[in-house]
């Protein structure tokens, strides 16, 4: 039996720091009211994909669905911006359930760092020297040495972002997979990465870390001079993103595969 759609009465607005987004928020609050986001039925984020990632992180444990309206550049994670009939759009929206990646990184000083990523976790060389990485999956070494500019692990939601630019695969939003994609691989030159089950525990060891320093980036959080990076999907946290009918993440990801 299909589950009844939620009715969203109280709305909490958040906006990026651009004048356009601030003015849009002012007009929308004047028309629809404004509730504290943590206490609202739904959060409406006004900005671009960067703001959406920040909003997902900020309200990670709130359980409040998030509906974005694009006032940025690409807006892949956002809906079209319109001021009219917002409450009707919210009540007819389709939900996508997403889980972040949990990254644990150890740096050269022995410090441990913990971050979450909704798009991808990336490793990058910090200098002119190429990075040298060892890749292990579920405790088994799968590649003894990858010489490259970097590597990333992308969620389905993030597979059309940096992962796509690095020639990684596009994943349907409900696919039980993660994309492992090298960035400018030198040796092995023709290796294009792998598709991993979402339960996989991924480990990168940085080889020759003193000579070839590497940073790890979880979405926008950067940790420099890492020596070990562990990544796993965090099933403890689930976020609900809302999209207009016919324009949900499944449709966007499918459409992206036919662009040329």
Image (cartoon, grey):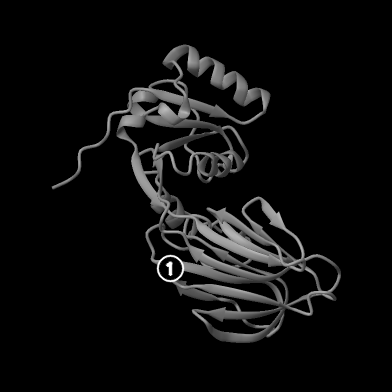
Left or right position of 251 against 136? left
Left or right position of 186 against 241? right
The residue drawn where x is 39% and y is 64% is 175
| Residue 161 in view in this figure | no
- SS at badge 1: loop
Q: Dot 1, crowdedness within 10 Å: few (<14), some or many (≥20)?
A: some
Q: Which residue is mark 1?
A: 198
Q: Quadrant of the C terminus?
A: bottom right
The residue drawn where x is 50% and y is 30% is 81
Left or right position of 98 against 221? left
Q: Position of residue 122 (x, y in %)?
A: 64, 63
Report how many numbered discs are placed on residues in the image: 1
Name the residue nearer the viewer: 69 or 197.
197
Residue extending farthest to the top is 30
Does residue 219 sit above or below 240 in this rendering?
Answer: below
Q: Position of residue 73 (x, y in %)?
A: 63, 40
Residue extending farthest to the left is 1
The residue drawn where x is 42% and y is 20% is 84
| Residue 41 in view in this figure | yes
Instruction: Answer with the quarter of the image where residue 50 lies.
Output: top right
Name the residue nearer the viewer: 104 or 145.
104
Instruction: Answer with the quarter of the image where residue 46 lies.
Output: top right
Q: Position of residue 26 (x, y in %)?
A: 55, 16
Q: Position of residue 132 (x, y in %)?
A: 74, 79
Does residue 220 sit above or below 176 in this rendering?
Answer: above
């Amino acid at each position: 039996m299909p589950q009844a759609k939620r009715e969203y009465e109280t709305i909490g607005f958040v906006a990026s720091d651009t004048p356009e987004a601030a003015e849009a928020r002012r007009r929308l609050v004047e028309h629809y009211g404004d509730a504290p986001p943590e206490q609202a039925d739904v959060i409406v984020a006004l900005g671009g994909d960067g703001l959406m990632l920040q909003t997902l992180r900020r309200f990670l444990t709130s359980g409040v669905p998030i509906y974005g309206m694009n006032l940025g550049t690409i807006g892949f994670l956002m809906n079209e911006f319109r001021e009219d009939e917002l409450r009707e759009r919210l009540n007819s929206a389709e939900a996508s359930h997403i889980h972040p990646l949990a990254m644990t990184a150890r740096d050269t000083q022995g410090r441990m760092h913990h971050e979450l990523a909704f798009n991808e976790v990336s490793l990058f060389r910090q200098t002119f020297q190429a990075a040298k990485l060892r890749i292990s999956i579920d405790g088994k070494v799968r590649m003894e040495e990858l010489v490259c500019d970097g590597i990333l692990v992308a969620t389905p939601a993030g597979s059309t972002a940096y992962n796509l630019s690095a020639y990684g695969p596009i994943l349907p939003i409900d696919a039980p997979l993660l994309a492992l994609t090298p960035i400018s691989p030198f040796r092995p030159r023709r290796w294009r990465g792998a598709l991993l089950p979402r339960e996989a525990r991924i480990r990168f060891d940085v080889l020759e870390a003193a000579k070839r320093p590497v940073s790890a980036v979880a979405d926008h959080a950067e940790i420099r001079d890492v020596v070990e990076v562990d990544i796993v999907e965090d099933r403890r946290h689930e976020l609900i993103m809302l999209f207009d009918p016919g324009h949900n993440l499944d449709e966007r990801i499918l459409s992206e595969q036919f662009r040329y």
